[in-house]
Image (tube, helix red, strand yellow):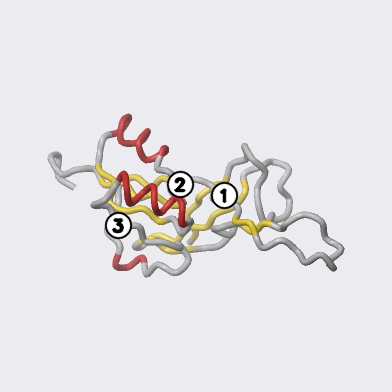
Amino acid sequence: MTADAPRLIGSLCSGYGGLDLAVQEVLGGTVAWHADNDPTAAWVLARHWPDVPNLGEITTVDWSFVPQVCVLTAAFPRPRKQPRPSASSTRRSPATTPACPPERPFTTGATSWTTSPTSPSASTPRTASPPGSATALTPTS
């Protein structure tokens, strides 16, 4: 990257893009792509970043064709609600599943990454993190 080339930012589980705006404000640069499969988030991203592609579900993207970035932002995904159980079911509340499963590896260019909960009490993988908890994005070999 040359001194006058723009710093490119990639965004995983972008939501409304708040983290991307903060990174742009602090570090400068341009958002090269978003990756969020939530329909509401996709609508917001398309409206506020009409020239930035949304790659959708991160587990199905062929990352070898995605522009490499200098800064990668990642927010923990909001769980998707599943349909309510039927009246004959013994379960009373809807189940949730993560939009981007924790501890699922993916590759960006030459580096492989895995997501995992960062809670010190997380001795086993969780299917969803409670509000306010963090998720680590760590390189794998």
Residue 47 x %, y %: 32, 47
The kind of secondary structure element at disc 2 is loop
Against 105, is 47 above or below?
Answer: above
Q: Which sits earlier in the primary sequence, circle 3 or circle 1? A: 3
Q: Is residue 88 left or right of residue 137?
A: right
Query: Camera-side residue: 2 or 46?
Result: 46
- Amino acid under disc 2: Gly
Percent across and percent down for residue 108 are 38, 60
In the orientation shown, which residue stands out farthest toward the top? 26
Mark 1: give few (<14), some (14-19) or many (20+) Cα within 10 Å: some
Q: Which residue is mark 3?
A: 53
Q: Are marks 3 and 1 in contact (CB under 8 Å)?
A: no
Tell me the SS state at disc 1: loop
Image quarter of residue 36: bottom left
Give, as a three-letter code, the residue at label 1: Arg
Mark 3, residues whose alpha carbon is within 10 Å: few (<14), some, or many (≥20)?
some
Residue occupying the point 39% across, 52% down:
43
Earlier sequence position, callout 1 versus callout 2: 2
Between the residue at mark 3 and the residue at mark 1, the CA separation in whole angstroms equals 21 Å
Residue drawn at x 27%, y 52% is 52
**Labelled pair 1, 2 in contact (Cβ < 8 Å):** yes
Give the total number of marks visible in the rendering: 3
Frontmost residue, 103 versus 45: 45
Q: Hey, what amino acid is under mark 3?
A: Pro
| 42 shown above or below 104 | above
Reply above or below: 37 against 78.
below
Q: In the drawing, what numbered circle is on residue 15?
A: 2
Q: Report the residue marked by disc 1.
A: 78
